[in-house]
Image (cartoon, rainbow, N blue to C red):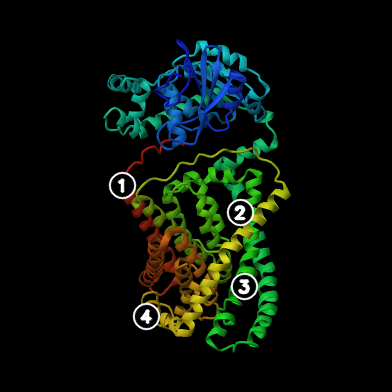
Amino acid sequence: MAHCHDTGIKINIPENARRIVLAGNPNAGKSVFFNYLTGLYADVSNYPGTTLEISHGRLGNDVVIDTPGVYGISSFNDEERIARDIILSADVVINVVNAVHLERDLFLTRQIIDTGVPVVVALNMVDEAQKQGLSIDTDLLADLLGVPVIPTVAIKKQGLEQVKTAVGSAKKGHIDGDLQQKLTRLSDRVGSQGEALLVLEGDKVIAMRHGLEPEDKREQIYLKRRDQVNDIVDHVVTENSRGAGIGIILGRWMINPVTGIPILIMALWAMYQVIGVIIAGTVVGVTEETILIGMYEPAIRNFVEQFIARDSNLGIILTGEFGILTMTVTYVLGLLMPLVVGFYFFLSLFEDSGYLPRIATLVDRVLTGIGLNGRAVIPLILGFGCVTVASITTRLLGSEREKRITIFLLGLAIPCSAQLGVIAGLLAGLGPQYMALYALVILTVLVIVGTILNTILPGKSTELLIDLPPLRLPRLDNVLRKTGTKSYAFLKEATPLFALGALIISTLQITGGLTMLQKMLAPLTVGWLRLPPETATAFIMGIVRRDFGAAGLTDMALTPMATVISLITITLFVPCIASILVIFKERGPREATLMWAGTWVIAFTVGGLVAQLSGILGSGSDNLSIPLVLVTFAAITLAVLLTCRLLQKPKPGSGLS
């Protein structure tokens, strides 16, 4: 058995045989091509050092090798490393490209062509492209790439024989002139154009093989490659809406900013009406106030009182104001569960219909400014329902860096639905100028803090690589199953944390720690925030439940500006005890402590800044101070963003989209 030294896989390679390698993005249809080309004469080998299996078989005297589905060839993960090594050893590459996602798949095509390996492009799923109103000029695509392009429908075996025949006419494609000069210079040192390309792109593994330092041209090469792909797609693809169904047209509208933003606003408005108005206003009123506070809590107190005195320490811990058997059950089942079920219902609805990945695509460019990608929109949207739930869902993000940024922004600047309802009620009676001041200050803090974190945190965030499934009517049984599964998982994970939070607060109440904290905060609230001393109680109550803090302001005699300052501070203040406990679980004691302390500092700094500016600039007049405060915050935001822009170094590989 001969040894294929470039790939590391032991394969019988007959003399003068060609290595024909199949390459493509995930779900492009490579397996159908592999089965057609090799028939029943296929074998599977584990790639050395991994558990990944690589299929290989015979096509006449030649050997066909399949590769894992990848979006690029480098050393980012095992799949890319394996695909890279196999492609670099190829005599011919059959690049299977999904015609529906040509803009995405051609990035890999261009990278393979740049390695100098002869290529045949199998343009697969052309029937699906036609159904979506996409017409692709394959002859022009072949001219622009410089390689044969064969339209195929693999599952119907259309075009497969032509691909097999085209292997003999595979060509090295067109390469950018500047890149070719760099490759020629470096190829003399490393021995092959493919490895020269990867050294230029900063692949440390390939550079190390030749005793070289990896170069820093990845950003430059990726950006140019992306521009080339976009230019090719603009020339060869024609969209014909007449050939597309309503789902295809609507799907395109959803990712176009001009039409997608209004659609997103309408979808979020519908979500707010159901969750924020119907569930939070009506359903929670029944579950929390009527059933649990009105019926359950008196019953459980009377039952426990038969064994334990109500005013004893144990009685207070079990059934007191913050009791484990009272507040925990009421909070989890009466308040949170209806809201959580509502949010997970909409999330499942968006997911099953194919709308959720389109939301991520739409907002991706906006979120990259704060170090996130479009996928982070999911926990951010969930945060408006419950920050505790949203903090748990940050697990779906692609890097620890993104998780840190998202969790901190959730705990800092995203009010949960219960708190938002109280805030909206308080602001509604003040007038639109005060609502604008509140909203713009919170948005400013979100943007500034996110931008600063994006600048100072080491590493880089992941790119948004996401498939857009067909838009379809969601199946109710799927939606209900997903909603039930996710809601139960939340209940199972969150209930012990709420119980622990109730125990901590009850202990503070018994020992006098709660009163002491209120007294400690009083000088800060009076001197710096220019608020009455009793607002300190509202802030402390906000640690227990975010809406408790906001609701505590309703009975206070505050001026409109003082109300806004209080609401800004209490929104940015530390999240509720359940969210804090989840943050500690997700990020560990050290990071969570820094985040918790950071929210204290930012909340009182921003609230005090608004209070001091309104006093200095407004000379006692709110009508005069509001626009001046807004202008000042706009200037601060612009200065911070410009400074971060100057300090921020380009991140390698960010040109890949």
In this orientation, which residue lies closer to the viewer: 318 or 1? 1
Residue 270 at least partly seen:
no
**Residue beneath disc 4:** 523
Q: Is residue 239 above or below residue 143?
A: below
Real-space CA distance between mark 2 and mark 3, rounded to the nearest whole angstrom: 29 Å
The secondary element bearing badge 1 is classed as helix
Real-space CA distance between mark 1 and mark 4, rounded to the nearest whole angstrom: 39 Å
Mark 3 vs mark 4: in front:
3
Q: Residue 586: x, y in percent?
A: 47, 59
The secondary element bearing badge 4 is classed as helix
**Residue beneath disc 3:** 329
Q: Residue 415: x, y in percent?
A: 52, 64
Q: Residue 15: x, y in percent?
A: 45, 11
Q: Amino acid at mark 3?
A: Val
Q: Is residue 605 above or below residue 293?
A: above
In this orientation, which residue lies closer to the viewer: 509 or 432? 509
Q: Residue 24: x, y in percent?
A: 52, 28
